[in-house]
Amino acid sequence: MLVCGSGIASSTLVAPTVEEILRASPYNCELIKGGLGDLKDKIDQIDLLLTTITLPGDMGLTDVPVVTVTGLFSGEKERIKVEILEKLDG
């Protein structure tokens, strides 16, 4: 799941790059976009959380790996790609 504060702005901007990274991976992934408020409803359905915001500590994400993808805004695609794939590899 790709999460930003509202589920509209920054997640929409980085979604194409994230989708490109996921398509090139050996995994069959579905990208779900949403805001912070959507996360609690979907937490049981996700294997990886990609975020453009700092998450509150009380989100209950102890079992879900998290990758902060704000580096995509500054051209850090390769670093983010490596981090995403490492998290998916488990």
Image (spheres, rainbow, N blue to C red):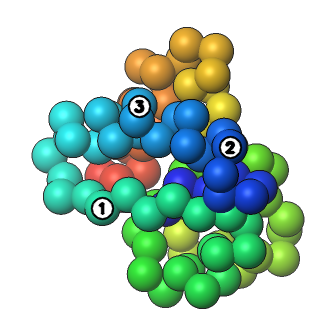
Crowdedness near tag 3: few (<14), some (14–19) or many (≥20) residues, C-alpha within 10 Å: some
| Whole-number angstrom distance, CA of label 2 to CA of label 1 | 20 Å
Q: Secondary structure at mark 2?
A: helix
Using residue 38 as the reference point, say whether residue 59 is left or right of it: right
The amino acid pointed to by label 3 is Thr
| Picture residue at 49% right of the left edge, 86% below the top | 44
| Picture residue at 66% right of the left edge, 82% below the top | 40
| Whole-number angstrom distance, CA of label 2 to CA of label 3 | 14 Å
| Picture residue at 77% right of the left edge, 55% below the top | 5
Q: Which residue is mark 1?
A: 30
Q: Is residue 84 above or below residue 3?
A: above
| Picture residue at 66% right of the left edge, 40% below the top | 10
The reply to whether residue 4 is in sight is yes
Tell me the mark number nearer the camera, choosing from 2 and 1: 2
Residue situated in front as seen by the camera: 78 or 87: 78
Check if mark 3's residue and mark 1's residue have beta carbons within 8 Å: no
The amino acid pointed to by label 2 is Ala
Residue situated in front as seen by the camera: 22 or 63: 22
Q: Which residue is mark 2?
A: 9
Q: Residue 9 sits in which quadrant?
A: top right
Check if mark 2's residue and mark 1's residue have beta carbons within 8 Å: no
Q: Which residue is mark 3?
A: 17
| Whole-number angstrom distance, CA of label 3 to CA of label 1 | 14 Å
